[in-house]
Every structure is written in structure tokens, then in C-alpha cells.
């Protein structure tokens, strides 16, 4: 039996990654959008970093970061198969991409999600993301990942 593991995206993961995204979209009633889903054909050309949860050769979880702009990166393609939700894998993905964002000089991570994705929203809020705006069903979050400034601490 294969065990779950965190790993960086490789080109051979493309088909399984795309399948995960499409399946989770279908679960939440989202349909394929050729413009929004163009990254699924070549994820490496769209993202700075993609972290995966894999079981054997199957991608069962994912989180991706865009190239930083003005010390801010976007979290994209954060998905888990239903059987893995609530088991800590979402937090592992968030911790991994947060570490990578900091390594790449980012001060903030932004993301958007839908109001109906209640479990995802709970995870984001529990891990420090703050809701900054809403446009219809779409919620926009940001997390400050700057290390604390030691000069601001007083003894």
C-alpha cells in the first residue's frame, strides 16, 4: 500500500494534477473554463512552485504559487481529495508553500476562494489568512508572512 507524501511537481504529474483540479471543480459545481484552466496543460509555465500530496503516482492534493510581484505571491490550485480533508494535509500544503514564498522574498500571500468552500475558508482563517474583500461569491484573503521585527519587541 502506498503512503501519502509531499513532493514538488514534476512534468510527469501533469495529467494527475489536471484530473485532481477538474474533479474538485466538479465537486463544487464549477465547469471547465478554457481561459481560467489554461494552466492545466503546462502548470510549470504558470507557477513558480507547485507542491503536491501524492499517493503512489496519483496526485491527491496540490497548492501552487505564482511568481511574486511587489513581494506578494498568489496561492492557486489549493485542492485536496475529499478523503484527505481534515487530516492535516491542507496545513502541510500551506506550510510548504508559505516556506517557499518566504524563501522567494515574499511578504504577503494572497488567495481567492468561493463562499461555498467552507472547509477551505476555515483552514485559511485558522492559518492566519485575513478576509480583505468580497465580490459576489468570491472571497479575497491575504496573509502577512514577514518575520517579526525584533526591534519592535521590548523587554
Image (cartoon, rainbow, N blue to C red):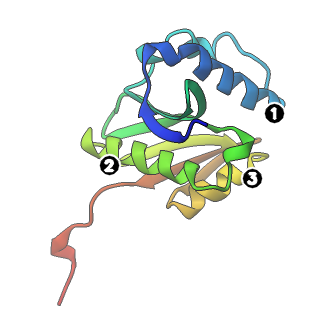
Residue 31, quarter of the rendered image:
top right
Q: Which residue is mark 1?
A: 27
Q: Which residue is mark 2?
A: 107
Q: Nearer the viewer, mark 3 or mark 2?
A: 3
Where the N terminus falls, by quadrant? top right
Structural distance between the alpha carbons of marks 3 and 2: 26 Å
User: Which residue is at the far front?
Assistant: 1
Mark 2 secondary-structure assignment? loop
87 up-or-down from 24: above or below: below
Nearer to me, 111 or 70: 111
Residue 145 seen by the camera: yes
Q: Which residue is mark 3?
A: 118
Mark 1 secondary-structure assignment? helix
Indicate which disc, 3 or 2, sits on the residue closer to the N terminus: 2
Nearer to me, 93 or 48: 93
Residue 100, quarter of the rendered image:
top left
Expressed as whole percent of the image width and height from the top left, the position of residue 102 reads 29, 46
Amino acid at each position: 500500500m502506498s503512503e501519502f507524501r509531499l513532493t514538488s511537481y514534476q512534468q510527469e504529474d501533469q495529467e494527475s494534477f489536471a484530473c485532481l483540479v477538474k474533479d474538485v471543480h466538479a465537486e463544487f459545481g464549477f465547469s471547465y473554463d478554457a481561459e481560467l484552466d489554461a494552466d492545466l496543460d503546462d502548470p510549470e509555465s504558470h507557477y513558480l512552485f507547485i507542491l503536491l500530496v501524492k499517493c503512489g503516482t496519483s496526485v491527491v492534493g496540490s497548492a501552487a504559487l505564482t511568481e511574486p510581484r511587489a513581494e506578494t505571491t498568489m496561492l492557486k490550485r489549493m485542492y485536496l481529495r475529499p478523503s484527505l480533508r481534515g487530516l492535516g494535509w491542507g496545513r502541510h500544503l500551506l506550510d510548504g508553500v508559505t516556506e517557499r514564498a518566504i524563501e522567494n522574498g515574499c511578504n504577503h500571500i494572497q488567495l481567492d476562494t468561493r463562499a461555498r468552500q467552507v472547509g477551505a475558508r476555515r483552514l485559511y482563517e485558522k492559518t492566519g489568512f485575513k478576509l480583505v474583500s468580497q465580490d459576489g461569491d468570491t472571497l479575497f484573503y491575504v496573509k502577512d508572512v514577514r518575520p517579526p521585527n525584533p526591534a519592535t519587541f521590548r523587554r
